[in-house]
Amino acid sequence: MGVPPKPTIRAAMIDPGVERRSDLPAEMTRFIGRRRELAEIERALDRSRLVTLCGVGGVGKSRLALRAAGAVRGRYADGARFIELSSLRKPDLLARSVADALDLPDRSAGDPVALLAERLAERHLLLVLDTCEHLVEACAMLAEVLLRAAPRLCILATSREPLDVMGEHILIVPPLDTPAPPEPGGAEDETECDSIRLFADRAEAMVPGFALDPENRQVVARLCRRLDGLPLAIELAAVRLRVMSVEQVDRRLGDRFRLLGTARSNRDRHQTLRATVEWSHELCTPAERLLWARLSVFPGSFGLEAAEHLQQSRARDARDTDLLDVLGRLVEKSIVLREDDGRRYRMLDTIREYGAERLGDLGEEHELRLRHREHYFALASDSMRDAVGERQIPLTRRLRGESANLRVALDHALSSPGDEPAALELAVELQSYWMALGLLGEARLWYGRALDACPDATPERGWACHAAAMFANLQGDQAAARPLLDEARELADRHGDADLHAHILQTAGRMALYAEDLAGAAELHERARAAYNEIGYRTPYALGNDMLLASVHAFGGEPDRALEVCEEGLKVSREHGDLWTQSFTLYVRAAAYWLRGDLDPARDDVLAALRTKEDFGDLFGITICLDLLGAIAVSSGDLVRGAVLLNSTQALWRTLGAPVQLGPFYLVILEGLREECRKGLAPDAYAGLSEHGQALSVDATVAIARGADPRPEGAADDDPGPLTPRENEVARLVARGLTNREIADALGIAKRTVDSHIEHIMTKLRVASRAQIAAWSSLRSRGA
């Protein structure tokens, strides 16, 4: 092979990029993740000649653009060039700065933009303009001129807001994935994500030998989540490992702007977390800064209506302008993020905390927190009043989406002298909300705080004492429940509150059931029933009395009587449009059918109840439905499914903080079912299924309850499932397409015996055709 000729002097003068196809800065640290974003950039550059990466400061736009440019530069004859603009402050020097970065001579007089366009006209080049936000108008003008003049030029820009140029393709760069928050009482997700991988990589560079292990993984996951998955914040946190442990970094993150800095913080806008956020703040208009500060009162996501209520300040500020316009600009600048298809907004915690500092400087914090509280107290009250019929589930789920705002509103009221009674009243209204979602521990926390803050013997205190007693009883804390219920009874007597008296009878009946006093429980629930029939069913909790009475009869060995009471309870709950109570009553009816040995109607009822519980997001209700589906599986002979379900729910009960579930009778039944699984399965098999069940997510457990394969992935098929070994053999031959006569000949048995086996298989599998038997057998043989 010959040596290629060197470029001529004239060629080098005309095209200085001939000798060096690209000039990309070297990457100083390992690049982590971002496969999806890199693929999106590559596709976008195929469709558009201007691609802008937008995102909040510190999200990694520059590093992503550099990596993307390196990956695609081979497509461009003149390679790729990276031009960093953060140090440039004068827009009129932009074109000259770009020309200088491209090593283009600057000896001609005239418009520098036109001269740059002329020099790039024939270039086949990828130009990376990094950090355009402070020069956005100049960058937009330059990009438009260059793209018109140079048909083979492509521009990849990074900016905290779009350039807003015709043909621009905008890609939003999100933070790195972070671990999902663990369920209450649950463990952190063990899955490694990009934020954890980034922290581990940078930590190992700071502290050689650092590695994730069972002791630090949970802290690292929480740290990455608290840092919003921002690469800059994660890297700065890793730097701190030079002088402190991961646990110490996590504990000190409350003052993240002070913690996440370096000794050279004055040299670069990315040397500290505060510097990069302040850079965004400097680029905002006064109106944008004001709204940024005001929106910091939202602890999580918020809707437009809530933001509008917040802006309706009593004293209008000269900087106040139209909310939609300013909010839109904050979204464009990546200060505020859009969620849920634009129906909601939020700020990353780092951005929100900086805004909260500015809000303190404005002197508006008290007024805005009061308006925040007013809005969410009204929202909660209206939702609880209107949550009936078809509106019950969407309104309950809407409130759940506002849980962070509700907590902040309650906390503010309980911390503001004179406002505590409003928090107590709201806590009373939210009883059925916390009950419907299974938020037992949270409910107890708020009732405890509200009762401590409101010692006066008011009617509302009586209702709060009753609710606190009910939730304590559900968690098995009888010692705390009894004095609370006694105080509620005393206040009901003092104020002549017959409705509260009826509720107290109902909760006392539930407590008697938990104390294994079936006769006392039945008598108390009957008295509550008589009282409700006289004064009316005024709360969702009252509608559940028949369901509880039916449970007492079921536990007492009277399933037929339980079924009768369930029918009456369903009638009342349907009249009042209470879907939550209907679903619980369906569950109790299913349990009564199961106790009577009627497995098909039991399964139908509990699956219907489970669907509603899932719609509500009621973990407590989901768990008891899964328990019953496990019981039905065991009674059907499917010990593998039963073992997995009953051990999965054992873990869910611990998550709920309700270790006694529905009382000692319930515990005895569950343990009896688990023992039946232990006896029916090999010890090693049961141990493996138990471990598998306790590690399952809620969604995976529900899928198994509905028919998915209960065995661990890759497990050997040494379990016959619901069929006998002979029935499994027949099912496999059906899957091969054999007729009953052919199966009989193959197995050396009579055809009528095969006919009988087929009937039994259809009954056990709840199918109605040979094709369904074949499908079941095929899935089982594949381990699907």
Image (cartoon, grey):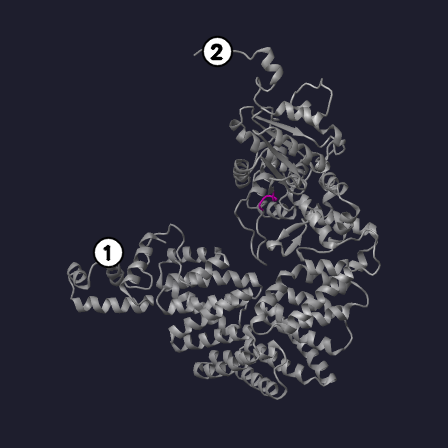
Q: Which of pointers 2 and 1 lies earlier in the amino acid sequence?
A: 2
The disc label shown at residue 736, or none: 1
Q: Quadrant of residue 755?
A: bottom left
What range is drawn magenta here? Answer: 173-177
Mark pair 2, 1: CA separation = 68 Å
- Disc 1 packing (10 Å; few <14; some 14–19; many ≥20): few
Front disc: 2 or 1? 2
Amino acid tagged 1: Arg
Residue 407 in sight from this viewpoint: yes
Above or below 155: residue 783? below
In percent of width and height, residue 262 lies at 72, 35
Above or below 353: residue 630? below
In percent of width and height, residue 550 lies at 50, 80
Amino acid tagged 2: Val
In percent of width and height, residue 183 lies at 57, 57
In percent of width and height, residue 125 lies at 57, 27
Q: Residue at x 70, y 82 (%)?
A: 492
Residue 479 in sight from this viewpoint: no
| Marks 2 and 1 in Cβ contact (< 8 Å) | no
Question: Which quadrant would the C terminus be assigned to in this image?
Answer: bottom left
Residue tagged 2: 3
Is residue 565 shown in magenta?
Answer: no
SS class, disc 2: loop
How many numbered marks are there? 2
